[in-house]
Amino acid sequence: MLPLAHAGHVLVDLPIFLGPVAVLAAWLAFMRRRDARMDACEQAEGEHEPPCQRGGVPGGV
């Protein structure tokens, strides 16, 4: 017989604990992607290419 007595607790606990973890992971991924774009933009400006035109980037609109 399978031990299913506590399956309900797992189904309740997963969203409670994984929700904040998922939000933090998404925030970290967003920040890494934004920083990588900003670094690429700064390097492109040094190579006489047109400046980046995205919001939030130094020199951008």
Image (tube, rainbow, N blue to C red):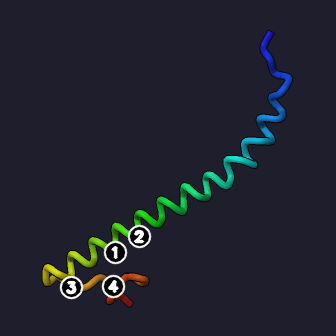
User: Please, is residue 9 above or below residue 44 in the view?
Assistant: above
Secondary structure category for the residue under label 4:
loop
Residue holding disc 4 = 53
Instruction: Measure the alpha-carbon separation of dots 1 and 3.
Output: 14 Å
Verify CB contact (< 8 Å) between mark 1 and mark 2: yes
Q: Amino acid at mark 4?
A: Gln
Q: Earlier in the sequence, mark 1 or mark 3?
A: 1
Residue 32 position within the rendered picture, expressed as x and y whole percent measured from the top left: 42, 63
User: Please, is residue 26 above or below residue 11 in the view?
Assistant: below
Instruction: Measure the alpha-carbon separation of dots 4 and 3.
Output: 9 Å
| Left or right, 36 with reference to 50 | right
Instruction: Measure the alpha-carbon separation of dots 3 and 2.
Output: 19 Å
Sort mark 3 into few (<14), some (14-19) or many (20+) by Cα contacts within 10 Å. few
Residue holding disc 1 = 38
Figure label count: 4
Q: Amino acid at mark 2?
A: Arg
